């Protein structure tokens, strides 16, 4: 009995405690712990301590940064000097590489130009043998070696022309004029092609350009004369034949054309002058009497 009594007392006490808790449980649920003065005071202290720690940490960082400034600046200066040094080394190396490259490029360029010239010479021999297909390949190879080889373009244009590729020939000749606008031979070629196509004015322009480049060839002037006379541009044609006569004043054919054109445009004075010059060269010229009669009718 004595042994059981303590257990009974403990059980009764626990029962009382449970009853109290059950009655007070709804109030405990409604209790806001954060609103307790003790809790609020404790949290205020934590906030104050945290802010103070952050402020002290910030001040410490600032002091540390200020103390390290000279060292950081020295490091930057060292880096700058090192970069300048490296830059000088790189520039010097680049200059030396550039000189070597330039020297190598110059030598390579000279070699390619030489190869291009040899190919043009070989292609010219193929053209002489009417082997235009082989010549075309060599001219193209010459241009691959030296894209500014004018003779290669001219040779290629001639090959195109001989193969009947007139448009390709014309375009190639015109490209040559972009490289050298004063190429007399190319102007003559383009003039001939324009003449074949019946483009007389275009032909005259090219022939005139050839005459400007070489004013000592009377045949160029007579070529222009023939074209202008054919399209009844008599006054301009007369100027062309006069230029030819300045180079060959005793050429009977030129004098014949001079008299004929002078009569057509009604220049009696020039026609009579032409007859006198013809008579001095060849008194037996059968046209003298005919010209004389036509002049009298002016």
Image: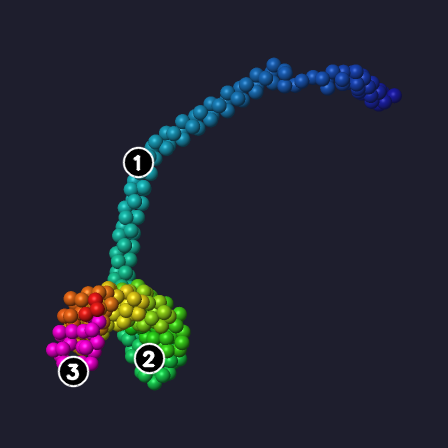
Residue at the image position 48 percent from the left and 23 percent from the top: 51
The tag on residue 284 is 3
- Say which label, 3 or 1, has the lower sequence index: 1
User: Which residue sits furthest right?
Assistant: 1
- Say which label, 2 or 1, has the lower sequence index: 1
Q: Nearer the viewer, residue 209 or 186?
A: 209
Q: Is residue 152 left or right of residue 53?
A: left
Residue at the image position 31 percent from the left and 80 percent from the top: 124
Query: Does the magenta segment cover residue 285?
Result: yes
Q: How is the image coloured?
A: rainbow
Q: Which residue is mark 2?
A: 123
Q: Secondary structure at mark 2?
A: helix
Q: Is residue 42 above or below residue 124?
A: above
Q: Nearer the viewer, mark 2 or mark 3?
A: 3
Task: Tell me the magenta residue range.
Answer: 275-295
Characterize the magenta stretch by its predominant secondary structure.
Answer: helix
- Quadrant of the rendered image containing residue 274: bottom left
- Quadrant of the rendered image containing residue 246: bottom left
Q: Nearer the viewer, mark 2 or mark 1?
A: 2
């Amino acid at each position: 009995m004595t042994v059981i009594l303590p257990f009974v007392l403990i059980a009764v006490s626990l029962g009382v405690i449970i009853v109290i808790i059950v009655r007070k449980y709804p109030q405990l649920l409604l209790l806001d712990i954060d609103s307790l003065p003790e809790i609020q005071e404790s949290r205020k202290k934590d906030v104050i301590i945290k802010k103070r720690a952050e402020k002290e940490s910030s001040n410490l960082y600032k002091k540390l940064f200020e103390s390290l400034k000279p060292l950081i600046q020295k490091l930057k200066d060292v880096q700058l000097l090192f970069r300048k040094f490296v830059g000088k080394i790189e520039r010097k190396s680049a200059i030396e590489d550039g000189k070597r490259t330039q020297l190598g490029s110059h030598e390579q360029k000279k070699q390619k130009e030489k190869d291009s010239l040899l190919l043009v010479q070989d292609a010219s021999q193929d053209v002489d043998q009417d082997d235009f297909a082989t010549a075309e390949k060599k001219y193209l190879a010459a241009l691959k070696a030296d894209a500014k080889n004018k003779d290669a373009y001219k040779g290629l244009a001639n090959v195109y022309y001989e193969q009947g590729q007139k448009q390709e020939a014309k375009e190639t000749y015109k490209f040559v004029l972009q490289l050298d606008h004063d190429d007399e031979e190319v102007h003559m070629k383009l003039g001939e092609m324009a003449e074949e196509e019946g483009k007389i004015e275009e032909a005259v322009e090219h022939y005139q350009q050839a005459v400007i480049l070489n004013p000592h060839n009377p045949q160029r002037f007579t070529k222009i004369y023939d074209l202008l006379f054919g399209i009844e541009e008599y006054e301009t044609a007369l100027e062309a034949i006069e230029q030819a006569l300045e180079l060959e004043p005793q050429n009977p054919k030129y004098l014949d054309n001079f008299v004929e054109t002078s009569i057509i445009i009604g220049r009696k004075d020039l026609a009579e002058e032409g007859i006198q010059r013809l008579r001095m060269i060849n008194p037996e010229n059968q046209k003298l009497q005919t010209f004389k009669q036509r002049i009298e009718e002016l």
